[in-house]
Image (spheres, grey):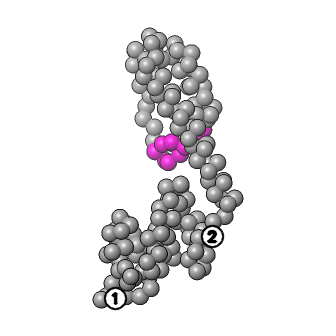
Amino acid sequence: MDDPDITEVARRSGLPASTLRYYEEKGLIASTGRRAGRRVFDPGVTQRLALIAMGRAAGFSLDEIALMFAPDGRPRLDRGVLAAKAAELDATVRRLTALRDGLRHAADCPAPSHLECPTFRRLLRAAESGAAGGGFSGRSGPAAAGARRAPVRRPADG
């Protein structure tokens, strides 16, 4: 099979040509030449793009992903780095699960006011201490991203 040109690689991968050019600029993929003025790639580029997509989905930066390839383009995965990222994802899943459960509780809580609910008050204490990944700790959320918090409104019904 002929080496696919950038249009065909874009079609197969679902990525725009601009992203492919950017990935080439970053050294993540390499064209093998040109045909009719268009970049052409080795047929294995789609597998490499799939690995890049998996890395991005897992939260790796493009620079981190670049380190996962040997100079010849073959994957060179550091198992320790992968294990560390998996542990990081586990922590994120736990934090998001706790936040989801807290939201569900707040939505369904029968207490006349959320501040009267022992479970909701426990969730607030956890958020204050940073255990829930809330903005008070500075670890994540809008405050960590530099966003300003809106004033807290306390409706009478909680």
- Amino acid carrying label 2: it is Arg
Q: Classify the position of the C terminus by image quarter.
A: top left
Tell me the kind of residue under disc 1.
Arg
Label 1, residues with CA under 10 Å away: few <14, some 14-19, many ≥20: few
Identify the residue at horizontal 35%, vertical 80% (top origin): 5
Residue 50, horizontal then vertical, whole percent? 47, 64
Residue shown at the point (53%, 60%) measured from the top left: 55
Seen from the viewer's position, the closer of residues 157 and 96 is 96
Question: What residue is disc 2 on?
Answer: 76
Quarter occupied by residue 126: top right
Residue 137 location, x and y as percent?
A: 60, 38
Q: Quadrant of the N terminus?
A: bottom left
The residue lying at 50 percent from left, 48 percent from top is: 145
Whether pointer 2 and pointer 1 mark residues with C-beta atoms closer than 8 Å, the reply is: no
Give, as a single range, the part of the protein colored magenta: 135-147
Q: Is residue 144 magenta?
A: yes
Asked whether residue 42 is drawn in magenta, I would say: no
